[in-house]
Image (cartoon, grey):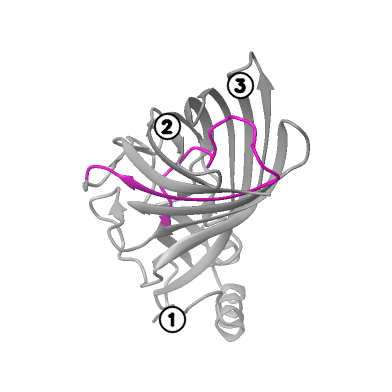
Amino acid sequence: MRVRGVLRPWFMVALLGLAGCGPAPVYQVRRSALVMHPTPPLRTGAPMSEPVEIAARASTVLMPIAPHEARDANADLHVARHNLSTSVRFRVSARGDLGLLFETGLQPGSMAIAEDSLALPDVGAVSGAGVTMQYAVELNQRVSLGIAFDGLLVAVPYREVLRCVENCEGISDFDRDATELTPVGRLALLPSYRERNVTAYGGVTLVNHPVAARRQVLDTWSADISDRIDPGPLYTLLSAGLDYRATPVLHLFTEGFIPVSRSVASYGPSIGFGVRLSLR
């Protein structure tokens, strides 16, 4: 039997009623979730040249193979191979800015990190929205050090399968598809060098990696209140890119990055392409 979203009230009442008549049923739980692959901020680290900037980036994990689950990670994830990001930023000082950020990871082409991963519902994408901010410290006339922060709430879709393993008389197994809001934060140091219309940049980014616990044992009382998606551990990303100002308004950029952490899954390199519009 499948129950979509949160458990229906009548279903929980029935479970709790049965639990009150004897030992509580104990469930073995399996979960799998769709998450975005880790990315650096949508920035160069240089200060904005105009009052408003609109940016968009498409990033792809280069090798179309599944990441490898880390030993003892107990994680079942489908990682989006293709991410899309867009932001609108506003200059609030000569070297500081604030903005809004939207990101999504596409389900088509997503990569399972576990060999026995659960099949996910057809949701299309995992998406999140939040805020972005940066201050670019001037090191000299051409060199800046951007200190950037992104904070998002991501709606992570997941599948959960519960199988009764103890005290199961009159109890049915069930599964459900749902979504849970999970915070994702990034903190980055982004040095940049600007020479006329070209900006070369790189950086180090810390970003948390959401995790769905693959295996867990729960009794009836905790089956509906446990955290299904955890914000997860911090990952470290190294990145480098080039931004070319093709016209006074249009910038074209490309960048590459790779996560060097392996606490959930081991990733290969990714590449991103995008545009920026500098508006008065």
Kind of residue indicated by mark 3: Ser
* Residue 219 horizontal side relative to residue 114, left or right: right
First reached walking from the N terminus: tag 1 or tag 2: 1
**Residue behind mark 1:** 170
**In the structure shown, which secondary structural element does the residue marked by tag 2 occupy?**
strand
Q: Which of marks 3 and 2 is nearer the N terminus?
A: 3
Q: Which amino acid does label 1 sit on?
A: Gly
- At x 30%, y 65%, the residue is 119
Residue position for label 2 = 242
Q: What is the three-letter code of the residue carrying label 2?
A: Leu
Q: Name the residue under label 3.
A: 144
Q: What separation in Å lies between label 1 and label 2 (alpha carbons)?
A: 63 Å
Label 3: element kind? strand
The answer to whether residue 79 is visible is: no
Task: Spot the residue most to the front.
Answer: 247
Q: Which of 200 and 150 is in front in this view?
A: 200
Where are the magenta residues, as a range? Answer: 34-63
Residue 170 drawn at (x, y percent): 43, 81
Real-space Cα distance between discs 1 and 3?
66 Å
Residue 126 appears in the figure: yes
